[in-house]
Image (cartoon, rainbow, N blue to C red):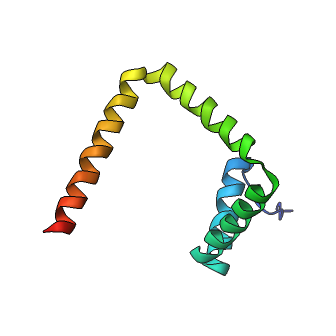
Amino acid sequence: MADERAPEKEAMTTREAGRRGGLRTKERHGSEFYRQIGKRGGQTLASRRTREYWAEIGRLGGNTVKQKYGPEYFREIGRRGREARRRRQAEQES
């Protein structure tokens, strides 16, 4: 008598299951769906948090960047920002 069982499937990782689910959702609803739910989530979070919360998050993030790259990093990105702003203003004036 021949063995008529279905071939065994390989176990799927959580990561692979999530990837497949995301691709399937994208097929069904399109990329715009992700933008919409992201926007809703952001608006909900913003309405639940105070200004002090966001200030603390910014301070912690800034300290982390300063520890990783040093204070010179902030001077450099500030300089680049000023140069870019001056270029845009010069282009608008001409």
> In this picture, is 33 found above or below 50?
below
Q: Residue furthest left?
A: 94
Report which quarter residue 20 is drawn in.
bottom right
Q: Position of residue 69 (x, y in %)?
A: 42, 23
Query: Left or right of 76: which side holds 32?
Result: right
Residue at 35%, 29% in the rendered image: 75
Residue at 64%, 69% in the rendered image: 34
Q: Position of residue 86 (x, y in %)?
A: 23, 52
- Seen from the viewer's position, the closer of residues 56 and 39 is 56
Residue at 64%, 58% in the rendered image: 19
The quarter of the rendered structure image containing the C terminus is bottom left
Query: Left or right of 48: which side holds 16?
Result: left
Q: Position of residue 74 (x, y in %)?
A: 40, 30
Query: Left or right of 61: which side holds 13?
Result: right
Report which quarter residue 29 is drawn in.
bottom right
> In this picture, is 68 found above or below 48?
above
Q: Position of residue 93 (x, y in %)?
A: 17, 67
